[in-house]
Amino acid sequence: MPSIIRVSGLTKTYDSGFTALQNIDLEIHRGEIFALLGPNGAGKTTLISIICGISSPSEGTVLADGFDIVKDYRAARSKIGLVPQELCSDAFENVWSAVSFSRGLFGKPANPEFIEKLLRQLSLWDKKDAQMRELSGGMKRRVMIAKALSHEPDILFLDEPTAGVDVELRKDMWQMVRELREQGVTIILTTHYIEEAEEMADRIGVIRKGKILLVEEKQALMDKLGSKLLSIRLQQPVSEVPEALAEFSLQLAEDGDTLCYRYDSRQESDSIARLLRKLTEQGLEIRDLHSSESSLEQIFVSLVHEKEQ
Ligand SMILES: Nc1ncnc2c1ncn2[C@@H]1O[C@H](COP(=O)(O)OP(=O)(O)OP(=O)(O)O)[C@@H](O)[C@H]1O
């Protein structure tokens, strides 16, 4: 798939001497939703700020739709809309002027039809004359998106779009982002929420301590994350896993009385029923069964840990 953003060898060392990004290579595909996941301080905002031309790189290059973000700053920036983490706007300005003004900042001629379409799409049309201070937090967030889209960019960055947003609003936001993607906008969002990445993203990148640890198709990542563990406690301990159960790749816990079976919870399968039947055929009596799902959080942490090793 063709790339719309190409980051090569990007390093950022702040004046304080702190290196927030180390030799980042990253390609964002045209038309995808890409989620950049990482803990606090990982470097997500720094990376976005550089791509959007707010902060300058120490080393490396970034191309946005073929334009170098330093050498062809204006052309590159015109391709990008940014919804920052902080909601910042003039409290007394009304929605219509805030959004129209943002368009003007990019040197685009006024286009009231487009602004109307945008406000309608973001369910802000009936608030077009309201002052920013009169809006709820969720509406303000939508105005920020309208401002970011006002100059018709092909790429939209959303820096933690749903931080501190309630579940209902979060779902609305996800829906809105999907609709934008359907219109051909490439979307890059940063988030702490694995759930959000799971719900939204086509691909997921994990960043930690200024380094990209992995970039994968969401589905591939979810396949790794989707396992469940069934612990089968036996009446009598065994010294080894019986040969007849080899197909299940069971692990025997140290004390010999618990068999552990890891399986993919999303695959339609009768493997548990088969396993239990075979256990009975082998004369192994079951004392207790316990099934647990590794939380995405846990697996995510172990994935990150594994990569760091
Ligand atoms: N202007 C600055 N000067 C020095 N260090 C900075 C500056 N801005 C950010 N940093 C440091 O760079 C690192 C990455 O910060 P950044 O804001 O990019 O992280 P983040 O992944 O966006 O975190 P969060 O999820 O908390 O927003 C942090 O250690 C931060 O303290």
Image (cartoon, rainbow, N blue to C red):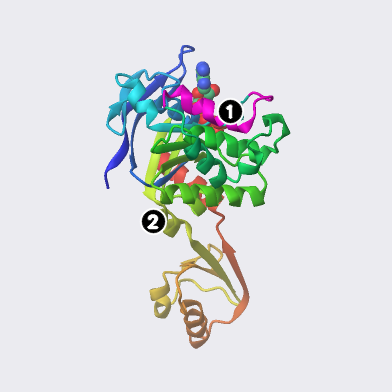
Residue at 56 percent across and 65 percent down: it is 255
Three-letter code, disc 2:
Ala
Proximity of marks 2 and 1: CB atoms separated by less than 8 Å: no
- Does the stretch in magenta take in 98? yes
| Position in image of residue 263 (x %, y %) | 47, 67
Other residues around mark 1 within 10 Å, as few (<14) / some (14–19) / many (≥20):
some
Between marks 2 and 1, how big is the CA–CA gap?
A: 44 Å
Q: Residue furthest bottom?
A: 281
Q: Residues within 10 Å of mark 2 (few under 14, many from 20)?
A: few
* Amino acid type, mark 1: Ser
Residue 296 visible in the snapshot:
yes
In this rendering, is residue 16 above or below 295? above
Q: Quadrant of residue 59 in the image?
A: top left
Q: Residue 156: image x %, image y %?
A: 44, 37
Q: Is residue 14 above or below residue 189?
A: above
Q: To which residue does mark 2 refer?
A: 220
Q: Residue at x 62, y 32 (%)?
A: 95
Q: Earlier in the sequence, mark 2 or mark 1?
A: 1
Could you say where residue 240 lies in the image, as x and y percent from the top left?
A: 46, 71
Q: Nearer the viewer, mark 2 or mark 1?
A: 1
Quarter of image, res 234: bottom right
Classify residue 88 as left or right of residue 113.
right
Label count reads 2
106 w.r.t. 137: above or below: above
Which label is found at residue 68? Answer: none
CB at mark 2 closer than 8 A to ligand 1? no
Which mark, residue 97? 1
Does dot 2 land on a helix, a strand or a loop?
helix
Query: Magenta stretch?
Result: 90-108
Q: Give the residue at x 59% y 63%.
A: 292
